Every structure is written in structure tokens, then in C-alpha cells.
Amino acid sequence: MNSLKITCLFLFIFFLLNPGIAQNNKDEIGYNINVKLEGFKNSKLYLGYHFGHKKFIIDTSFVDANNTAVFEGKNKLEGGIYLIILPSKKFFEIVIDQDQHFYVETDTSDFIMSMKVKDSEENTRFNNYQKNMRKLQVRMYDLKVRMNSNLNHNDSLAYLEKELKKYELEVKQLWKDEALKNEGSLLGKLIKAMIEPEYPQNYTPKDSLEAVRYYKKHYFDNIDFSDERMLKTPILNSKIKNFLENYLDYHPDSIISLLNYVIAPMKKNNKVYKYMIMQILSHFETNILFGYDEVFIYIAEKYFINDADFWKEPVYLSKIQNRVDVKKRIITGQIAPDLKLKTINDEPLNLYGINSKMTILYFWNPDCGHCQIVTPELHTVYEKYKEKGIIVFAVFTEGNKEEWNKYIHEKGISDWINVYDPDYTSKFKEVYDIMGTPIMFVLDENKRIIAKKINPSALEKIINFFLK
């Protein structure tokens, strides 16, 4: 398995085999959670927990004719946000921390607003917080609906936007109040983690760019990375996912600099750190954006391969090293590996045998939905610039040869060099790290990679730059 999809499996096994320290400051032994569900009986009920973007079941009970079920066990549960799950997969959340012997009653028509809790101050506070949030969310949703209905009425729209802003500020204030009220508890830490970074007193950014940089660098300031209980909540996954998808620059050096800054505070707890750094590595390993291979190589070498004593997982690190080796072969600036393939008429042809000022190495197949969009766009660019000495070396990655041949002639791309590997002797997917299609590499006259994983629009800019 070339991909670091093994990451998710390794991560889950790691935490499964290393259960951590249970929160055991109460005299009660184990856990005993009584649940009463109005409108639901004579069926199974599940107790689960969050881990990353997934949910796992840890216990099963049965709801009797009196709408009651009991979850119990001899050992304390690890702290986190847990789930009471119906067979329909509907669920509601509870806090598991110090209080592990308690009663919760609710109604299937509205879990949150109908809930009553006994013998758990933590869950009473959690439910009160949920109810307050629900009220604000309902008002905000109503405002957004009204805004969509008043897009052509500027006065009404301005008023509604002002009202929405007011409620957004109320949400932020609620977070601050609840975080302070529950300071030190798991609930307090979870709510605090949702609070966005704020500038220190007497600090004014010079310009908008400095303001953005400050926000990015301090994005994780309100997360307690020393607390393992955060792993069994949805917060860590939500925060790191949002950060990686929305707050990174486009230049590898800038991304690396920012990541080094935000990773440093994550090392307060080994398990939390391993989870976070694995999410970061996986993001850059699977994402095809330009420059991400360079970031992947840097993160893999600095935080994994060069820190082998910390990981103590030679097989896992060997897989990472293999991925690094693959990506280094096709990094921008390297000579592209040769490919010995066959034409549609089964005549041998290799990449290095093509003489052109620029070669567009294009991996695709006609059954790929995105390829059906990109291929005609690429052909339009090719038609526009082919007189400049551009050649498209189009590699059919998989599928039916007859369908491929039919598509080539129907779509008018027979003027490309269309090739394939019927016996897969070239291993082109492994050589060029093809984990999906379409994938495009741009090679100069010496077959040096000058760009990769780009779209036809970016290709046109590259052509104009290099072939003026």
C-alpha cells in the first residue's frame, strides 16, 4: 500500500492499545448511565464516542417497554464527548468526565430541548449550554432565510444583516462566558477551543496582511493540547481540518513556516501531538494542490523520519520514507522519469523519445467525470498553442480500450500522442504518484518538470511565460 491511508488505521490502533489514564477522582466504580427516551422502546441503544471525524460504538444496551436503558461497565470511561445513538443513527451528546453515574431523560422529538439530567453537574451545564446555543442558532437561521428573501430590498437586507451580526456577537460572548464559568473542566476547555483568536490589548495590526498572519499563527491558542480528553471530542478534527483547508498560503515556504509555528505547542501530550501531526501529514500526502508535495516531504522528514526515536514504529516510518522517495522523484525541477508505453495501435513509444519545446504529460481516463471536463479544456489550450511546439502525451490510466479509442475520435483528440500500458509494466501510477485523475505535468524541452497538478487555465499562463 503506497498511500498513507495506513495513517488512519495506525492512529486508531495506537490509541486502542494505549488507553490512557482514566479519570477516576470519584468513589463510584466504573460507569453507570441510565437513559430514558420518550417515544422509543423495545430496541437497541448504543453508547459511542468521537474520534477524529469518525464515531465508534463502545457499549450496547436495550430500551425496555418503559423507555429505559442502562449502560454500565466495571472500568471508568476515558473523558470525552460521548454519544447516545439510536439504530436510525440519530444521536445526542453527553459529557463523560468526573461524573460517570448519572441519569438522563429526553424525547426523540427534540433531544436537546427536552433533556433533563440528574446526578451530573457537568451534563446539566452542557445541556444548558446546548439549549442557549440552539435558541441563538434558530434566530440566526430565521434571519438568513429572511435575508435570502430580501436580496433585492437593500434597506431590509441591511437591517437583517445588522441583526445577524448582533446574534453572531452573542454566540461569541456565550462562548466566553461559558468557558470562564466552566474553567478547568472538560466542558470549559471544549467551549474555549471554539473561541477565535483575539488581538492583545494595545495591539493594532499595521495592515490587513499583518492581521491575517496574526490570526493564522494564533489559530490554536485556545486549545489545551496537554489534555488527552480532547481526543474523544469532535473539536481537534474540526479545528485542524478548517485550518488546513482555509488558512494556508499557496507558497510551500510560507506554509512550512506557519506549520512549524503552530506545531510547536502541540507537543505537550504525546498522544494529542501524534494525532495532530498525522492529520497534517495526511492532508499534504493526499492533496494534489501545487506545492503540497514539497510540504509533505518537509513534514515527513522533520517530524517523522528524523524523529524515529519518538515514534518507535520502524514499519510505519518505512512506509513514510517510501512515499517521500516517490514524491522526490517528481518534484518540480527534477527530470521526469521516462515511461515506456504503447500507442493505441500497440506500437512501443517512450516519453524520452518525444522531441518538443514543451510536453504536457496528462494522466486521464474517459470514465472519470472530472476528466470529461478538463480534457476538452486542455484540448482548447493545445489547439491555441500547438504551433509553439507543444505536445500532449496523454496516458490512458485504466478502463476499456475500445471505449478509450471511441472517446478519442468522438472528442477530436486524436492529434495528441495517446498511449497506454496494457500490461502495466511501467508502473506509471507508482512512478508518478497517480492517486486520481486527471493529473497534469508540464515538462520543458529537456523533460524537466516545471509544473504539475495544475488545470488548463494555469497551463496557459505557464505556456505564455516559458514560450514567449
Image: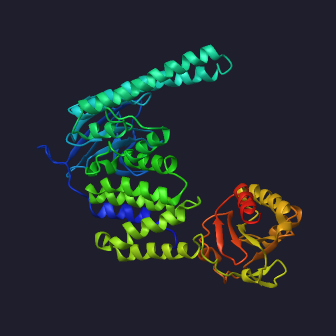
Q: Is residue 452 left or right of residue 353?
A: left
Whether residue 408 is visible to the viewer of this picture, yes or no, is no
Would you place residue 37 above or below residue 362 in this image? Answer: above
The quarter holding residue 464 reads bottom right
In screen coordinates, is 60 left or right of 380?
left
Please tell me whether residue 388 is drawn above or below residue 244 in the rendered image: below
Which one is nearer the viewer's eye here, 384 or 75?
384
Query: From where the camera sits, is residue 186 visible?
Result: yes
Image spot of residue 441 (x, y percent): 67, 68
Residue name at image x 36 percent, y 36 percent: 199
| Coordinates of residue 456 in the picture (x, y in percent) | 73, 58
Q: Quadrant of residue 180?
A: top left
Hey, which quadrant is residue 190 in on the image? top left
Residue at 66% over, 16% down = 153
Task: Identify which residue, 140 or 30, lies in the foreground.
Answer: 140
| On-image quarter of the C terminus | bottom right
Rendered location of residue 198, percent (x, y) = 36, 36
| Residue 51 screen position, x and y as percent | 38, 52
